[in-house]
Image (cartoon, rainbow, N blue to C red):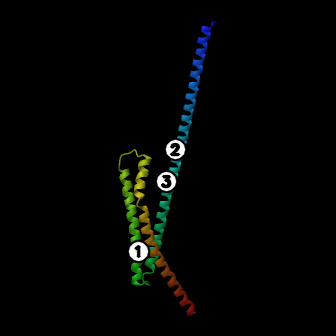
Amino acid sequence: MNDRDTERLNKFIRGVQSTLANHEKRIGECQQQVQYASRQAASQTGQSTVDKTVEELKRDTAHYTQVVMLAGYAGFFTLWTQTRDEMSLWLFASTGALISTSLFVFVVFELYKAWALGRLFSRKPPFHANDVNNAIASANKYWQPAFLVSSITGLVSGISLLAWFVYKSVVAAGHIVGAA
């Protein structure tokens, strides 16, 4: 082999080495992009799972709160109607107005929520998870004020009724002990 052939061969080898080095660099960049994309996908999948879990917890909490409130209304109205003959008109009317306000706000909110969700489901399918979550979030944006008004008026009326009931029970127990 002469010098000219050697020179061409060396040039060819350098070209191949340069091309291989460029390909290795590009392969490394591609691997980094794939790793980044897989981390992003895993993160989004994990975030999606977290979002679903949080949404389920919110719904479960809302359902539990509804059950507790309905049980509270049932208990209040039972005690209220059973003791109305012994109550003063002012206490009967004020506790009745407070619990009625509480119940009214609660029912109006539940009807609004049912209407808002009904609007979504009256559209033609398919429904996407985002559509449903957005509709629920939109309906629930009034939950905190409705809950505060409903629970505060309900608690004030319930505590008033319970305090009166305990007072009357203590007075009645005192009369029984005094009569014995």
**In terms of image quadrants, where is residue 180?**
bottom right
Cβ atoms under marks 1 and 3 closer than 8 Å: no
Query: Counting residues from the N terminus, which is met first, the one under dot 1 or under dot 3?
Result: 3
Residue at image coords 57%, 18%: 15
In the rendered structure, the answer to whether residue 120 lies left or right of residue 44 reads left
Q: Distance between the residues labelled 2 and 3?
A: 16 Å
In the rendered structure, the answer to whether residue 83 lies left or right of residue 8 reads left
- Name the residue that disc number 3 marks: 55
Tell me the crowding category of disc 1: few under 14, some 14 to 19, or many 20 or more residues within 10 angstroms, Cα based: some
- Mark nearer the viewer, 2 or 3: 2
Residue type marked 3: Glu
Q: Given the current orientation, which residue lies at the most extreme top position?
A: 2
- Name the residue that disc number 2 marks: 44
Query: Counting residues from the N terminus, which is met first, the one under dot 1 or under dot 2?
Result: 2
The percent position of residue 38, horizontal first and vertical second, equals: 55, 38
- Name the residue that disc number 1 marks: 98
